[in-house]
Image (cartoon, helix red, strand yellow):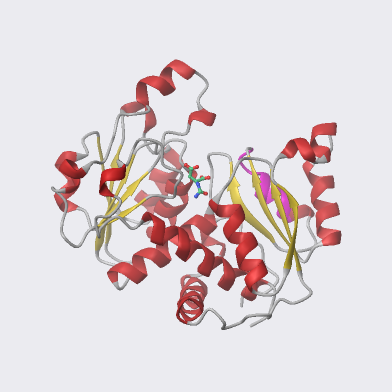
Amino acid sequence: MIEGRSLVEPEDFSLSEMESLFSLAEKIEKDEKYLRECLKGRLLATLFFEPSTRTRLSFEAAMLRLGGNCLGFAEPGSSSASKGESLADTIRMAASYADAIVMRNPKEGAALLASRYSSVPVINAGDGGHHHPTQTLTDLLTIRRLLGNIENITVGFCGDLKFGRTVHSLAKALSRYPKIKMIFISPAELVLPEYIKSILVKQKVQFEEREGLEESMNELDVLYMTRVQRERFFNEDDYIRLKDIYVLNGEKLSLAKKSAVVLHPLPRVNEISVEIDDDPRAAYFKQAKYGMYVRMALLASILGAI
Ligand code: NCD
C-alpha cells in the first residue's frame, strides 16, 4: 500500500509495491479508459524550480486523464521563491491547497526536506544531481515491457554518470533485482559517484567502469544513453570538451545485439544521432510514453483511488 506516502528515492517503495505499479500501468496502457475519473475533484501541485518537458507534462497529463486537476509553476521566477521564500514555507502552502505535490528542484536533498514539511505526499521529480525516482519507474517499466522481465541482463550506462540523476536512481534500483550486470561507460571526469558504487558493492552487484562505448556494444541488453548535464558544470570549457564524447550512430548500433534496447531519459542533445530513431532497438520515445502510464498508476495509488 503506497497510499499517502512520499516518493523521494527509488527504494522508498518495495519491489512488490513497484511490481503492483507496473501491472497497473500495463492495465492502463491496454485500456486507457481504465481508472478514468478516479481522481475527480483531486488536485496535484506541480512545483518546477528547474526546466522540464516530459516529467511535468506527463504528470499533468496523468492527473488530467484520471479526472483530476493541476496547479503550479514551471519556473521559479514566477513563484515567491524569487522573493526569498524558503522551500519549507512554499511547501507548507502548496500542501494546504493540493492533495499531492510533485517537485523538481536544483538542490540535492530538497525533496527529502519538502517531504518533512508537507502534510500531503511529495513526489521527487528530480533533486539536483541526486535522484529522479519516477524516471526510474519509467525506465524499469520500459525494460520489463520490452525484455519481458528485469533480471539476468547486462545494462550499459553511457555519458555523464557523475551528474546524471536518472543514472544514480536507476543503478540503485537495479541493484535490488537478480543477476543484473552493469557497465558504466564515461570519461574519467564523469564517472559514477562513490556513494552509488559503494551501494553496488554492498549489494554484491557485478559492475565494471570503462571509457569505450564500441567495445561494450555487443555485451549489452540495455544501453542507457545520457546527456552531459551542462547546468551542473562549474566550467563551460569543460562542458564543451566533454559534450560530444559519445555519439550513438548507426555504425555503433550495428555492433549491438538484435534484441538490445536503447533507452534515454531525454532530452537528447547530440549523444544519439537521429539516424537511428527508426531502428526497432531505439525505444526512447516509447519509454517517454510509458512514463505517463506509470505516473497515472503512481498518482492513483498514492491518492488512494485504487
Ligand atoms: C532527465 C532529468 O531531468 O534528469 N530528464 C527527464 O526527466 N526525463 C534527464 C536530463 O535532463 O538529462
Q: Residue furthest top?
A: 237
Q: Residue at x 53, y 48 (%)?
A: 131
Q: Residue at x 27, y 55 (%)?
A: 278
Q: Main secondary structure of the magenta part?
A: helix
Q: Is residue 205 left or right of residue 55?
A: left
In the image, 74 versus 190, the foreground residue is 74
Image position, residue 224 (x, y; %): 34, 49
Q: Residue at x 62, y 75 (%)?
A: 301
Q: Is residue 218 left or right of residue 187?
A: left
Q: Residue at x 51, y 78 (%)?
A: 28
**Which residues are drawn in magenta?**
107-115
Query: Relative to 194, is 35 above or below?
Result: below
Quarter that holds the C terminus: bottom right
Count of labels shown?
Answer: 0
In the image, 45 versus 174, the foreground residue is 45
Quarter that holds the N terminus: bottom right
Q: Is residue 96 visible?
A: yes
Task: Answer with the quarter of the image where residue 257 lies.
Answer: bottom left
Query: Relative to 244, is 207 above or below?
Result: below
In the image, 220 versus 257, the foreground residue is 257
Image position, residue 300 (x, y; %): 63, 75
63 falls in the magenta region: no
Q: Is residue 150 visible?
A: no
Q: Is residue 156 left or right of residue 226?
A: left
Image position, residue 47 (x, y; %): 71, 49
Q: Is residue 68 left or right of residue 54?
A: right
Image position, residue 263 (x, y; %): 35, 53
